[in-house]
Image (tube, rainbow, N blue to C red):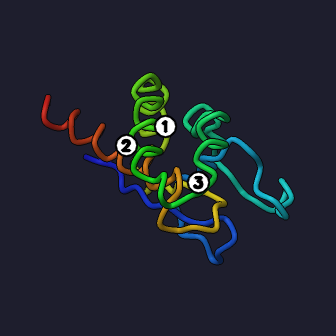
Amino acid sequence: MPVSIQIWRVYHKPRPAGYAVLVERLWPRGIRKTDLALDEWAKDLAPSTALRQWFGHEPERWEEFQRRYRLELAAAIPAARQLLSAAGGRPLILLYAAHDEAHNGALVLQGFLQDLQGAAASRD
């Protein structure tokens, strides 16, 4: 059965219940590590430093960012599958820090993970 995948900005409260995973390469500004209860910090599934810096959260680069990030994720399928498995049937909460809620890596990762689950379901 597919895992429910939600994205959630780390600064919004209260956070929904589920397997909470930070999907940023950098720790969110202004939040102490002791204040952000995480099940996992998936740096290996976050956009590369070069891609993140190139994107710079510029909406006009969004389409190309998604394409490039999905290429990076395609090389990390084992880590993505492990993340889905680690949720153990609980909702997967992808935590991100970006101000732009419509153009961020968590949205791309959410879609990628959903596609991965769909591909696995179609093989079964």
What's the amino acid at mark 2?
Leu
Pointer 2 with pointer 1, Cβ within 8 A: yes
N-terminal-most mark, 3 or 1: 3
101, above or below 69, in the image: below
92, above or below 50, in the image: below
Q: Which residue is identified by label 2?
A: 113
Residue 88 in the image: state x and y as whole percent: 44, 43
What's the amino acid at mark 3?
Ala
Residue 23 in the image: state x and y as whole percent: 60, 47
101, above or below 5, in the image: below
Q: Which residue is identified by label 1?
A: 83
Residue 84 in the image: state x and y as whole percent: 42, 40
What's the amino acid at mark 1?
Leu
Q: Quadrant of the C terminus?
A: top left
Residue drawn 51% across and 57% down?
Answer: 93
Distance from Cα at disc 3 to Cα at disc 1:
11 Å
* In this picture, residue 15 sits left or right of residue 11: left
Q: Secondary structure at mark 1?
A: helix
Residue 26 in the image: state x and y as whole percent: 74, 45
Nearer-the-camera pick, 37 or 7 = 7
For the residues carrying marks 3 and 2, which lies nearer the camera in this image?
A: 2
Distance from Cα at disc 2 to Cα at disc 1:
9 Å
* In this picture, residue 17 sits left or right of residue 116: right
Q: Secondary structure at mark 2?
A: helix
Distance from Cα at disc 3 to Cα at disc 2:
15 Å
Residue drawn 63% across and 77% down?
Answer: 14
18, above or below 100, in the image: above
Q: Residues within 10 Å of mark 2 (few under 14, many from 20)?
A: some
